[in-house]
Amino acid sequence: IKKITKQIPRMYNAMILSYKVHIAYLNKTIEQRYLIPKELDTITFKFNTKKYMFEDSNESIDDWFLTYEKLRIKIFKDKGKNTKSLNTELDSLYNYYEKKLKNSNLLKQVNELYYYDKLDRLYPNSKKVTDYIKKIKNPIACKTLNNLLFNYIKNRFNSFNFKNLKLNTESSTYNKLFATGLFIYLKRIDFKVGELKYQPAFDWLKTTNFYAKNAITINKEFTPLNNTEFKTRLQNIVLLNKSFKETNFSKLLKENPSDFYLIDLWATWCAPCIEGINLIHNMDIPKNVKILNLSTDMLKDQQKWVTKSQELNIKTDALLKSDNENNRGFIKFIEMNSIPRYILIDKNMNLIDEAFYRPQESQFLSQLNDVRNHNNW
């Protein structure tokens, strides 16, 4: 039995982590789901060669997920013909797990989430679903929650007057969930800025705290940076190497040949930046991707930057000259309001992702491993 220990990317208090691995000698891909509470930092899997599955000390929720998933497929295929009987089956499933989970509030939250996700598919515009979303206090991050929020907005979109929409009477959690659902909905329908039907919704989204905190991620979906201008500005930035000699980005790429590059904009005073650098050190970064660290420290702190870079064992690092006009223009162009900021490019400086996932996010490594297929993202 082989053991695998994984560091858990911590972005949420509670989440459902999907772990997928391909067993080459079996030509079999195994995917299992685990409920991760906020207290858990690592998870260790043991591969059971008899059952062909990974086992760990935490209870897998695959049984729940797959049982509810079978019902979701039934609902989809039924097309509203047997809604009452499917509702009875859904209620029975919910009650079965509810009785089974007398002492676990977190697992009960999962049961509720799975239940209301399927209920909204049975009864679009259900008031019960609206009431449920409004009462959520501690959301569990997972695909099911995203799907529920997407359908919640989709089924009610035409009933919202976004030109005068106010959610002041609702909780801050509901406001965030509503804005998240709207973002997911606009993203999935391939909304383009300027479309008359959806523009008021996007304009409303821009007034929210959710947008203020995630503006870069949201804007890259709907108003991506111009690739030609990005390349020009990137070529024109002025850097300092660790010997304090001027260099440029083109030279940096020639010295570090690769098919793809992840630019890590960081600073010595930025704790999340340093956490990200340390996490990357412990990852199996694909061989066709190189990390290029660009420090945003002030020129007066250049010695501090070199010292910290050495402490962190950063292999490829350069300092953006803070007094350079081209550098300031580049920072303004990419709308860098906070760090760390990760930008994914190819060897020709073509922009792939202007606001890539952070190392703390589970998609970080999986997307890097799939970088050759970036045109399909």
Image (spheres, rainbow, N blue to C red):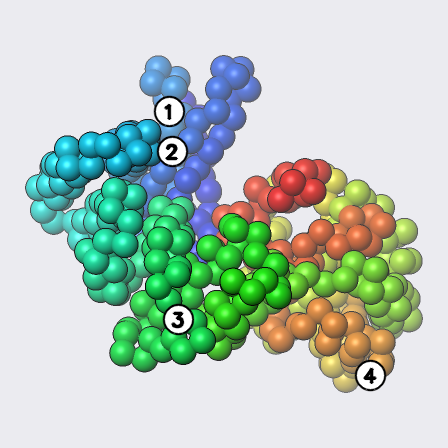
Kindly report the distance in space between the C-alpha atoms of the residues bearing marks 4 and 2. 51 Å
Kindly report the distance in space between the C-alpha atoms of the residues bearing marks 4 and 1. 56 Å
Kindly report the distance in space between the C-alpha atoms of the residues bearing marks 1 and 3. 49 Å
Q: Nearer the viewer, mark 2 or mark 3?
A: 3
Q: Which residue is mark 2?
A: 32
Q: Are marks 1 and 3 in contact (CB under 8 Å)?
A: no
Quick one: quadrant of the N terminus? top left
- Residue type, mark 3 in image: Asn
- Residue type, mark 2 in image: Gln
Q: Which residue is mark 3?
A: 161
Among the two numbered marks 2 and 1 on one chain, the one whose residue lies closer to the N terminus: 2
Q: Are marks 4 and 1 in contact (CB under 8 Å)?
A: no
Q: Nearer the viewer, mark 3 or mark 4?
A: 3
Q: Which residue is mark 1?
A: 53
Mark 2 surroundings within 10 Å by alpha-carbon count, few (fewer than 14), some (14 through 19), many (20 or more): some
Figure check: 120 above or below 303: above
Residue at the image position 66 percent from the left and 68 percent from the top:
266
Q: Nearer the viewer, residue 332 or 169?
A: 169
